[in-house]
Image (cartoon, helix red, strand yellow):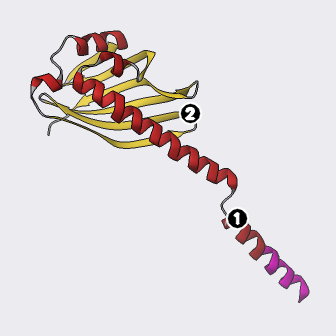
Amino acid sequence: MKYPLGLLFLFVTMTAAAQQPSSKNTTKMNNYSADSAAISAILNDAYFKGIYAGDTALLGSTFYDGTLLFGDVKGQPYYKTLAQYLDGVKNRVSPKDSGKPFKAGIVSIEIINSIAVAKVQVKMYDFNYFELLSFHKLNGKWVIVNKMISDVEG
């Protein structure tokens, strides 16, 4: 009888220990929260503001130099280098100056270690863009390393 009771005690002890959050899990959760907040700040304070105002210096600060942009706009293939994209932003009437409505927001952010994907929506001019922005944490800073874009109705 002592043997089964000892096993029961061992099982209960191990189950309780397994249910306790480890400091490693707490650290990962804290890092996730901090990284999610950092990416949100980049999107809200620089990316969206840069697009809205046509501020290519601010917008460009969110990207890695070698970023490529792919997708479709109004059903047509879209491919640009970062330099081509920023040049287009520089030479268009900004949403701010156009007087047309502008709305941008974060749909979701997923983070795995030093990589992340943010799904955002940007409504401007006559476009309703959904974008998947790939981030990488380089030298302690999150930067966009790839931009995928699709214009959808609505």
- Where residue 12 sits: x, y (%)? 75, 76
Residue 28 percent across, percent down from the top left: 61, 47
Q: Position of 148 compared to 113: left or right?
A: left
Query: Farthest bottom residue?
Result: 1
Give the x, y percent position of residue 133: 39, 30
Q: Position of residue 108 (x, y in %)?
A: 37, 44
Find the magenta span and give its range: 1-11
Frontmost residue, 12 versus 29: 29
Residue drawn at (71%, 71%) of the image: 16
Residue at point 9%, 28% (across, down): 99
Q: Residue furthest right?
A: 2
Decide: is 66 above or below 31. above
Residue at the spot 69% in from the left edge and 57% down from the top edge: 22
- Apparent side of residue 40 relative to residue 25 in the rendered image (left or right): left
Q: CA distance from mark 2 to mark 1?
A: 27 Å
| Between discs 2 and 1, the one toward the N terminus | 1
Task: Specify the amino acid type for callout 2.
Answer: Ser
Dividing the image into 4 quarters, which one contains the N terminus? bottom right
The magenta stretch spans residue 36: no
Depth check: 8 or 63 in front? Answer: 63
Q: Badge 1 is on which residue?
A: 18
For the residue labelled by badge 2, is the local secondary structure a helix, a strand or a loop? loop
Residue 40: give its label: none
On screen, 97 above or below 112? above
Amino acid type, mark 1: Ala
Determine whether 75 is above or below 119 in the image.
above
Please tell me whether the stretch drawn in magenta is mainly helix, strand or loop.
Answer: helix
Q: Quadrant of residue 95?
A: top left
Q: Is the C-beta separation of discs 2 and 1 under 8 Å?
A: no
> Quadrant location of the C terminus?
top left
Q: Which mark is residue 114?
A: 2
- Indicate the secondary structure of the residue bearing disc 1: helix
